[in-house]
Amino acid sequence: MFKRVLGMFSNDLAIDLGTANTLVLVKGQGICINEPSVVAMQYDKHGQQRILAVGQEAKKMVGKTPGNIKAIRPMKDGVIADFEVTEMMIRYFIEKAHKRKGFFSPRIIICVPYGLTQVERRAVKDSAENAGARYVYLIEEPMAAAIGAGLPVKDPNGNLVVDIGGGTTEIGVTSLGGLVQSKSIRIAGDSIDQAIVDYVKKNFNLLIGDRIAEELKIEIGTAIPLEEELVTTVRGRDQIEGSLTSIEITSEHIRAAIQDSLDGIVNALEDVLELIPPELAGDIVENGIVLTGGGALIRGLDKYISDIVKLPVYIAEDPLLAVAKGTGIALDELDVLQQTAYED
């Protein structure tokens, strides 16, 4: 009864704390924040720091800041790399989303990568509690992705989801409200961007940043040959002459650049497929594989994976928001899904 009374005075939150983006949902209201996981810190002459910007405004500063300002991505490979800045970022998003007029702090459920250590789980939980949460629950990313993709996770049937996020790719087989098999690898959006940076440097002697590489991936990235190549112009600095220049990059170049990364994801998927219990294998053959996350939007990735593993592959509706939506559904059904969202 007391918990119900507390709930009347606070808006509980679901947070998809991603390496690239953080999404926040308010219970009963849906997604209210979808911003980059970036914080810009300003330092005075005494070394004291203050938050200058968070989210989209901070991302615009990446690679462009003077000496007294640093644009920091506090999440790396799905885990907290900078505890203090992560806490500041979570506090900012909680205050922005909650806007509470009552007396009580919100309950918060946070999505985390599969396989985090207890120390890493505690770091996430402590960050949220220090930022003002009343209770903190964690849900593993493959389960959140499956829920958000609309898969019947509570049924006694096997479903397989591959979530390609910013820092990690999460692969999970669900059945009866739990994860039967899971794997998390640190090959995802960020490493794909880095592969593009390295390819352009090696083959064109052109230095570009991560932001430009991400734009290339989105604009012309492809996992399979296209009937008509896409072409764009990219600007950067010639690493030999040091001059600023521009070159033309095609979708075939990007396909070559990201080939090894995609192969790494498929290899991890094949490892999971080999461990699926025989009772669930038939379900996967029938239901196929569902892709979520920003990486699912790479052109032809579903066909690329399907041709290798010989199973049907589908892209979830609105794959970018699948994990956040799944975390929000888990918040709504916290009592029902206690085996998937738990308090550490």
Image (cartoon, rainbow, N blue to C red):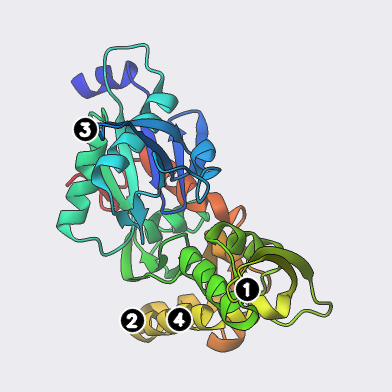
Nearest-to-viewer mark from 1 and 2: 1
Distance of mark 4 from mark 2, alpha carbons? 23 Å
The residue singled out by tag 1 in the image is 241
Q: Earlier in the sequence, mark 4 or mark 3?
A: 3
**Rendered image: mark on residue 264:** 4
Q: Residues within 10 Å of mark 4 (few under 14, many from 20)?
A: some
Q: Is residue 235 left or right of residue 69?
A: right
Q: Is residue 90 left or right of residue 58?
A: left
Going by the numbered disc 4, the residue's amino acid type is Gly
Which residue is nearer to you in this view: 335 or 212?
Answer: 212
Picture coordinates of residue 18, whole percent (x, y): 41, 51
Picture coordinates of residue 328, whole percent (x, y): 43, 41
Q: Judging from the image, what secondary structure is the residue with disc 4 in?
A: helix
Residue at the spot x=26%, y=30% of the render? 133
Distance of mark 4 from mark 3, alpha carbons? 37 Å
Q: Judging from the image, what secondary structure is the residue with disc 3 in?
A: helix
The residue singled out by tag 3 in the image is 130
Distance of mark 1 from mark 2, alpha carbons? 57 Å
Badge 1 vs badge 3, beta-carbon distance below 8 Å: no
Residue at the spot x=53%, y=61% of the render? 210
Picture coordinates of residue 307, whole percent (x, y): 61, 86
Dividing the picture into quadrants, the one containing residue 108 is top left
Q: Quadrant of the N terminus?
A: top left
Q: Earlier in the sequence, mark 1 or mark 2?
A: 1
Badge 4 vs badge 1, beta-carbon distance below 8 Å: no
Q: Residues within 10 Å of mark 3 (few under 14, many from 20)?
A: few
Dividing the picture into quadrants, the one containing residue 305 is bottom right
